Image (tube, helix red, strand yellow):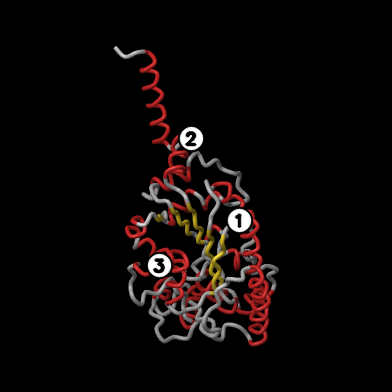
């Protein structure tokens, strides 16, 4: 016959185990915080800067990363557990152990270093053309994120891209059935009307996470860019990563494809091919969308604005990694 004290202890232990399975209590939080998670790295994109490539290579090498104590939850799981809670117009939702469940459910709870990768943490690409705003809620979203994380990130990676190719690439990805086709002069008016730029995003990141090391780099279309980002994230371990040679990330359409896509959206169908088929066509050898996208006077203003912002960024981030060639900025 067990003593009352022993039975009470068993009941208490069972309650703790049940709470841990549900992810609802302090026990699971403490176990993960003390025995696994030691370092947190944020990869914030941005959109149209090879984020898909980085995420794909890291996912393909999950086993190698785990052997070295590194884990990256799948982007879909990260969005469900964290990113969806960052909308400043919604009430703050309690985590109820959500971060710990994210690590547990994605099989990375035993990893000492966690990489969280989702460009939507900054905001959404469609805000540019739908609402004529350039990442308007980054500060508020990151403040919410800081309250959801168990530890502050030690490093934050962000890729930026010259405006002359970023906005054409963003427009190419924004186009879809149900969205309006925008004349180029309207796009120019939207872009030149922005009061915010990459320098504002970087400033807001540093305000919310002042202790984090910033790894900011300038996008270029050469395949080495994605590999360079992986080296920034992982150091020498990046040399052991497996990836498909010649793999290209989530490329936008060429100028020719974009024109055909716009015609498909305007008329419902073009030459028997729907919009999705046009988007999937091979663009090998075709002129990039950025060529001829801007009128000469607009292009000069867009380039000037980027250079001004870049000067401010260089003061904020002395270790900023410049693209190897100013002209190597294909709209991918």
Task: Determine whether, in the image, residue 150 is placed left or right of residue 224.
Answer: right
Q: Is residue 26 visible?
A: yes
Pointer 3: residues within 10 angstroms few (<14), some, or many (20+)? few
Name the quarter where the N terminus is drawn.
Answer: top left
Q: Nearer the viewer, mark 2 or mark 3?
A: 3
Please report contact status of discs 1 and 2: CB closer than 8 Å, yes or no.
Answer: no
Q: Compare marks 1 and 3 and give the one earlier in the sequence.
A: 1
The residue labelled by disc 3 is 236
Of 13 and 180, which appears nearest the observer?
13
Is 240 placed above or below 13 here? below
Q: Nearer the viewer, mark 1 or mark 3?
A: 3
Q: Residue at x 54, y 61 (%)?
A: 156
Q: Quadrant of residue 275?
A: bottom left
Q: Residue furthest front?
A: 236
Task: Using the numbered discs, state the Cα–Cα distance from disc 1 to disc 2 in whole angstroms.
Answer: 25 Å
Task: Using the numbered discs, state the Cα–Cα distance from disc 2 to disc 3 in whole angstroms.
Answer: 36 Å
Q: Compare marks 2 and 3 and give the one earlier in the sequence.
A: 2
Please report contact status of discs 2 and 3: CB closer than 8 Å, yes or no.
Answer: no
Q: Position of residue 47 (x, y in %)?
A: 52, 67
Q: Position of residue 7 (x, y in %)?
A: 36, 17
Q: Secondary structure at mark 1?
A: loop
Q: Secondary structure at mark 2?
A: helix
The residue labelled by disc 2 is 26
Q: Position of residue 167 (x, y in %)?
A: 57, 74
Q: Residue at x 57, y 64 (%)?
A: 214
- Which dot marks residue 209? 1
Is 169 placed above or below 7 here? below
Q: Secondary structure at mark 3?
A: helix
Is 6 placed above or below 282 here? above
Q: Is residue 275 visible?
A: no
Q: Compare marks 1 and 2 and give the one earlier in the sequence.
A: 2
């Amino acid at each position: 016959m067990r003593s009352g004290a022993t039975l009470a202890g068993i009941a208490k232990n069972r309650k703790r185990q049940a709470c841990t399975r549900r992810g609802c209590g302090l026990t699971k939080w403490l176990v993960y915080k003390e025995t696994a998670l030691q370092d947190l790295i944020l990869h914030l994109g941005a959109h149209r800067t090879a984020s898909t490539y980085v995420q794909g290579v890291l996912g393909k090498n999950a086993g190698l990363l785990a052997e070295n104590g590194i884990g990256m939850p799948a982007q879909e799981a990260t969005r469900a557990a964290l990113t969806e809670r960052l909308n400043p117009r919604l009430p703050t939702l309690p985590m109820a152990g959500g971060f710990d469940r994210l690590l547990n459910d994605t099989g990375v709870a035993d990893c000492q270093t966690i990489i969280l990768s989702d460009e939507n943490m900054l905001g959404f690409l469609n805000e540019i053309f739908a609402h004529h705003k350039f990442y308007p809620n980054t500060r508020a979203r990151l403040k919410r994120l800081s309250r959801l994380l168990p530890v502050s990130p030690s490093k934050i990676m962000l890729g930026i891209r010259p405006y002359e190719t970023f906005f054409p690439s963003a427009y190419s990805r924004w186009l879809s059935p149900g969205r309006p086709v925008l004349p180029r002069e309207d796009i120019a008016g939207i872009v030149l009307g922005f009061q915010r730029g990459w320098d504002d995003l970087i400033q807001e990141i540093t305000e919310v996470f002042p202790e984090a090391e910033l790894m900011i780099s300038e996008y270029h279309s050469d395949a080495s860019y994605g590999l360079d980002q992986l080296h920034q994230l992982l150091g020498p371990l990046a040399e052991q990563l497996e990836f498909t040679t010649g793999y290209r990330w989530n490329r936008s359409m060429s100028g020719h494809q974009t024109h055909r896509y716009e015609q498909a959206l305007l008329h419902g169908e073009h030459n028997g091919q729907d919009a999705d088929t046009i988007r999937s066509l091979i663009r090998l050898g075709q002129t990039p969308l950025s060529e001829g996208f801007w009128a000469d006077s607009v292009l000069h203003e867009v380039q000037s604005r980027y250079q001004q912002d870049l000067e401010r960024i260089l003061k904020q981030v002395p270790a900023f990694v410049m693209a190897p060639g100013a002209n190597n900025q294909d709209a991918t």
